[in-house]
Amino acid sequence: MRLVCLGDLLLDVIVRLDEPLSPGADAVAVTHAGAGGQAANVAAWAAELGAKARFVAKRANDTAGRLVDEEIRTRGVELVGPVVEGRNGVVVSIVGRDGDRTMASDRGVAPDLEPEELDPAWFADVDVLHLSGYSLMRTPIDGAGIRAAELARASGARISVDLSAWTRIREFGPAAFRGRLETLAPDIVFANEPEWEIVGGAYALARAFSSAARNWPSRPPPAASPS
């Protein structure tokens, strides 16, 4: 099975606090840094489970960009896409002792991926194309996502979309975001309840969901290769 994901390749920094933050003071914490981003995580887990995974992203040639480039490759993911001058994306997650999480996100150059920067060969052998909802809410990466879907469909692939954060959908505009989804006509939509509700799941996306349910048995996915 060949899975291609398109989205942000970010340096993911997780800070787990051992004590509450106090303004102007230090706090004891345990930290972890590594490659992240919603679609990048999907690609990494698919590779871990035995699928052939390819990730399409624009990234910077700075220190953060080089770190995440190296790490995602070590996880068995084929990484493609332009490398440019600029600032790679970084997301910092602060996790309190109660497990509550607060995130600060800087997407860097990732949303600047242009449709013209996609190589059709990246999508010629794909079984499933996965898109992050974040990639549909900024320009020009939204155009790149739509172009990727066109190329993948031409190869007979299914399309999946993770709606991502409902707060970002609210800022972007639920109706506009729903319009992007209808353009893509995904076979599979991943969402939690707040995300599903804000885009009107019972209204417009019901068609995509029903279509996926009807067509799913007609083309069973191939078994994941152990290599």
Image (tube, helix red, strand yellow):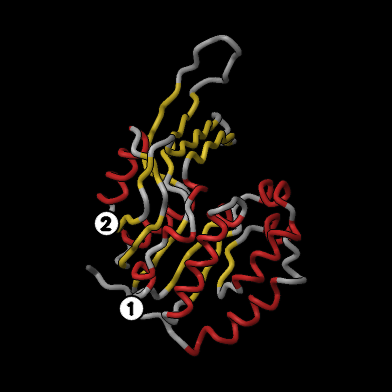
Q: CA distance from mark 2 to mark 1?
A: 18 Å
Residue picked out by circle 1: 223
Q: Is residue 70 above or below residue 115?
A: above
Rendering quarter of residue 99? top right
Q: Secondary structure at mark 2?
A: loop
Taking the spot 66% from the left edge, 47% from the top edge, the residue there is: 168
Residue 32 horizontal/vertical position (percent): 38, 33
Is residue 161 left or right of 226 when viewed as pictured?
right
Q: Which image quarter: residue 180?
A: bottom right
Instruction: Locate the C terminus and report the quarter of the image it occupies.
Output: bottom left
- What residue is at 46 percent from the left and 36 percent from the top? 90
Q: Amino acid at mark 1?
A: Ala
Q: Residue at x 43, y 61 (%)?
A: 5
| SS label for mark 1 | loop
The disc placed on residue 76 is: 2
**For the residue carrying disc 1, how many other residues have a C-alpha within 10 Å: few (<14), some (14-19), or many (20+)?**
few
Q: Please name the residue shown 77% across and 71% down the image.
A: 203
Total residue callouts: 2
Q: Nearer the viewer, mark 2 or mark 1?
A: 2
Q: Check the image and name the residue furthest to the top.
A: 24
Q: Of the two numbered discs 2 and 1 on the same chain, state the one appearing first in sequence.
A: 2
Can you name the residue that lies furthest to the bottom here?
A: 218
Relative to 187, residue 59 above or below: above
Kind of residue at disc 2: Gly
On the image, the x and y values in percent for residue 72 come to 32, 49
Q: Do labels 2 and 1 touch, CB within 8 Å?
A: no
**Residue 158 place in picture, x, y as percent:** 48, 76
**Relative height, residue 90 to residue 216 (above, below):** above
Question: Percent position (x, y) of residue 45?
Answer: 37, 57
